[in-house]
């Protein structure tokens, strides 16, 4: 005897809720065991830019956190508040709570795909598929940390869910979907490829499905622009003060006078051609550093590649189901291709990493008709993924539970209690700056020749504040060159230095004492 549809939905929801609860508890234990986050970006710019944005420092400082000073700081506000106001592990768990919002979105997408594929929501293969998506090594590496590719992935996955949610009023859901993609791209420009992929998907759905109209597509585009506009205040600030809306990126195009006319790109993360890309897809199953600094391994990608040829000639479904199914795969493939061409940096791929399990499931459904065989195949793939997975380590330290001593900063009292103009040499250093006097000014040296000239002019202005250095490590020969770049000659000063220690690095703060 079949259960009524209402009872079936209740059972499905309960099963998903229990599995999501299990995921949340496992993730919380995982985050706790790793310890306090100390990743380079947190020390280099996440913590300081969140602090600076909240405290409206604006033009008071110049490039204090290097190039990171000019990336949108809004995503860093939450991690700054967590690390500065909550004790460990509650700070990490608060961040984790946001990151785990991707999980119910993933579950929702799996339910919509089940409808599209003509599979019952109670099918065990659906549950295994979305759980397989969570075996994403780079996503797991970011849990409880200040990295926000995993936080903005929440917007992308919920936006994708609303794009496929076949409930009226469709235009309203597409408006919200577009807003989420636009907001994600505005907060982190590397999410741009997913916004483009979503637009391509929305166009495909509009052209191929009878139920959708140009009104729905127009709603999505309006939402996309509106979501981005929510973040536009920062880009307007960059435009009005540094003469480029995304300063200093793509400066060959925008030609800001404060940076060289080059389009910045880290050449470590690029594919030289199709052969290089194909080699990566094989190597990633065993461990690679091709697209990220620490080694990671993800066997699911090679499984995906091996399934594609068979799935392309697999059995078809109804016309509407085919249109929606193709749309889902189109989003994944378009986003993946744009990522490989523009960035090829693994952390920026997290939204698609989380979808890999569902893509594998879709391909298996087109290849295997029996549910028991699908379950067996997915369990085998999951076991292989667990066996092969290598989760990157970005830096953690063990601190006592209940401790708020996030960084272990120890600054000599004479420096901490009096304001000064600080010249920052070497990164990561900016996480120390909020511990210094609030009336201080911070200038990061060596970001560009043009910004050094701006700093030199600021130092030439009349001020009662002393000039001090904050430098990574002990005094180095490059210190004199860095100071000369801002107009301070070696013969005009001597350095009065004291050491500063933190959990990760050793620094020196030196006051520039004028020579008589």
Image (tube, rainbow, N blue to C red):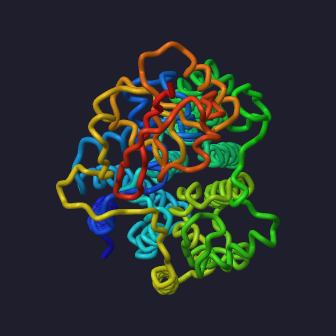
Residue 285 appears left or right of 54: right
Judging depth in this view, the residue of 378 and 317 nearest the camera is 378
Give the percent coordinates (x, y) of residue 515: 51, 28
**Residue drawn at the location 64% of the way across and 63% of the way down:** 318
Judging depth in this view, the residue of 326 and 183 nearest the camera is 183
Q: Does any portion of residue 41 appear in the rendered image? A: yes
40 vs 380: above or below: above
Name the image quarter holding residue 8. bottom left
Give the percent coordinates (x, y) of residue 68: 55, 41
Give the percent coordinates (x, y) of residue 3: 30, 69
Quarter holding the N terminus is bottom left
308 vs 39: above or below: below
**Residue drawn at the location 55% of the way across and 50% of the way down:** 476
Name the image quarter holding residue 13. bottom left
Judging depth in this view, the residue of 482 and 208 nearest the camera is 482
218 vs 201: above or below: above
Residue 149 appears left or right of 457: left
Determine the residue located farthest toward the front in the rendered image: 516
**Residue drawn at the location 39% of the way across and 42% of the way down:** 432
């Amino acid at each position: 005897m079949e259960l009524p549809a209402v009872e079936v939905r209740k059972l499905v929801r309960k099963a998903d809720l229990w599995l999501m609860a299990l995921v949340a508890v496992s993730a919380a234990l995982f985050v706790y065991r790793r310890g306090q986050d100390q990743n380079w970006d947190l020390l280099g710019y996440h913590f300081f830019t969140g602090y600076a944005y909240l405290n409206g420092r604006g033009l008071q400082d110049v490039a204090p956190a290097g190039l990171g000073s000019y990336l949108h700081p809004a995503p860093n506000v939450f991690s700054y508040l967590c690390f500065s106001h909550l004790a460990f592990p509650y700070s990490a768990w608060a961040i984790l709570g946001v990151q785990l919002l991707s999980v119910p979105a993933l579950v929702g997408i799996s339910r919509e795909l089940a409808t599209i594929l003509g599979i019952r929501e109670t099918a065990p293969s659906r549950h295994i598929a979305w759980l397989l998506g969570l075996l994403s090594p780079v996503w797991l590496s970011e849990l409880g940390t200040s990295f926000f590719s995993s936080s903005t992935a929440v917007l992308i996955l919920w936006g994708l869910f609303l794009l496929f949610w076949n409930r009226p009023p469709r235009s309203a859901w597409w408006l919200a979907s577009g807003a989420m993609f636009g907001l994600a791209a505005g907060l982190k420009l590397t999410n741009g490829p997913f916004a483009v992929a979503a637009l391509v998907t929305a166009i495909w759905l509009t052209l191929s499905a009878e139920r959708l109209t140009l009104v729905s597509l127009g709603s999505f585009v309006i939402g996309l622009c509106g979501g981005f506009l929510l973040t536009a205040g920062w880009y307007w600030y960059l435009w009005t003060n540094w003469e480029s809306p995304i300063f200093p990126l793509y400066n060959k195009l925008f030609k800001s006078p404060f940076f060289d006319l080059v389009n910045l790109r880290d050449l470590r993360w690029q594919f030289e051609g199709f052969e290089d890309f194909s080699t990566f897809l094989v190597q990633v199953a065993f461990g690679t550093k091709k697209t990220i600094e620490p080694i990671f391994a993800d066997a699911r990608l090679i499984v995906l590649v091996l399934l594609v040829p068979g799935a392309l000639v697999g059995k078809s479904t109804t016309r509407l189901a085919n249109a929606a199914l193709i749309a889902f795969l189109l989003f994944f493939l378009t986003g993946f291709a744009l990522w490989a061409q523009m960035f090829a940096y693994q952390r920026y791929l997290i939204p698609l990493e989380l979808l890999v399990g569902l893509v594998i499931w879709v391909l298996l459904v087109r290849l295997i008709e029996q549910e028991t065989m699908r379950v067996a195949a997915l369990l085998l793939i999951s076991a292989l993924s667990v066996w092969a997975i290598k989760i990157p380590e970005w830096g953690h330290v063990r601190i006592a539970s209940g401790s708020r001593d996030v960084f272990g900063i120890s600054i000599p009292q004479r420096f901490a209690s009096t304001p000064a103009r600080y010249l920052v040499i070497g990164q990561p250093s900016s996480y120390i700056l909020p511990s210094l006097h609030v009336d201080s000014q911070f200038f990061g040296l060596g970001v560009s020749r043009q910004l050094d000239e701006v700093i030199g002019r600021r130092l030439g202005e009349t001020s009662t504040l002393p000039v001090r250095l904050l430098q990574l490590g002990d005094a180095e020969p490059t210190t004199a060159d860095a100071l000369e770049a801002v107009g301070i000659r070696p013969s005009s000063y001597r350095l009065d230095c004291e050491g500063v220690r933190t959990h990760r690095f050793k620094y020196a703060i030196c006051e520039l004492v004028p020579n008589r």
